Image (cartoon, rainbow, N blue to C red):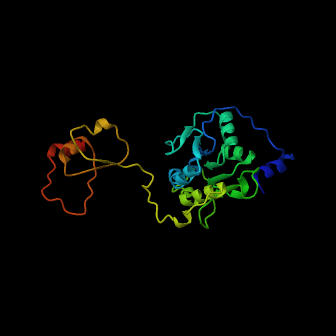
Amino acid sequence: MHRLESFALSAGSKISRPHIEQSFYPIPDKKFICVSRKAECDSKSYDFMDDVIFHIKSYLDAEGISIYEIGESNQKKLFYTKNYSHLNRLQSSYLINKSLLYLGNYNLYTNIASYMGKPCVCPMNVEYTDLFKPYWSSEGECMLVTPSSNLKPSFSPKEHPKTINDVHPEEVAKNVLDLLGIKHTLDKVSTVYVGEEYKQNIIDIVPGEYDIQAMNVTGPVNIRMDKDLLDILKKCNIIIENNNLINGLLIPREILLSKEK
């Protein structure tokens, strides 16, 4: 039984079709899809949406279809999309109504797209899909993509690791193109392995005549050891990774003392 039907049964009420307000917003493109990373909790936030966009971008470009990102989120904006995340709910509803398809995390916009009869593609795994799938979508219009696993949903707002990330990006991309009726060759693409650091941005730096600390770099950084290593050691805490012995490398005593402090 769907969650909405369960609520109606408990309240002794009848489910009627809602009314969703819209507000006009100028749209420069004739054909586009909407994508959103907005999520009510971390376990419902899919981390590989950029990879999905990478798979579908060339096919959409060939058909003259743009990609609009809607809905505020605390994540970085998606590559290859036009940013409309500043729109309010009424304006976003207008965009969804004019779009060809909704792609993204399961959220309010998923249900708005369902109400408006738009195809939906959402990666999901934290709840049983039959209980919360968009109520207004016809059979085959809404694809809630889940990983191939015998594990039951956790219903937890936080997971480590997140099981939603077990959904492969090419599977989401294939559903998008199939619902749009676009021929593709993504059946030949298959994810082999995704490491824990895959979604982490790592910067490679070649030391030079500039202050690395002044670059305000956050997150892990790979730095070449053969250039000014001792000067870098004086300024930063680093981890040296090497599969060979480093002969003749002497770390000055003042550097060791500064690290102890």
Q: Quadrant of the C terminus?
A: top left
Q: Is residue 244 visible?
A: yes
When the figure is inspected, residue 160 is found, relative to residue 83, above or below; the finding is below
Left or right: 9 in relation to 79: right
Q: Nearer the viewer, residue 26 or 132?
A: 26
Q: Position of residue 90 (x, y in %)?
A: 69, 34
Task: Give me the residue at 62% from left, 36% from top.
Answer: 27
Q: Nearer the viewer, residue 151 or 198?
A: 198
Left or right: 26 in relation to 212: right
Q: Position of residue 101 (x, y in %)?
A: 65, 49
Q: Position of residue 10 (x, y in %)?
A: 83, 49
Q: Is residue 105 visible?
A: no
How many numbered marks does the figure carry? 0
Q: Quadrant of the N terminus?
A: bottom right
Q: Position of residue 259 (x, y in %)?
A: 24, 44
Task: Give me the residue at 72% from left, 51% from top.
Answer: 134
Left or right: 250 in relation to 206: left
Quadrant of residue 176 within the rendered picture: bottom right
Q: Nearer the viewer, residue 140 or 152?
A: 140
Left or right: 165 in relation to 198: right
Q: Nearer the viewer, residue 153 or 51?
A: 51
When the figure is inspected, residue 27 is found, relative to residue 223, above or below; the finding is above
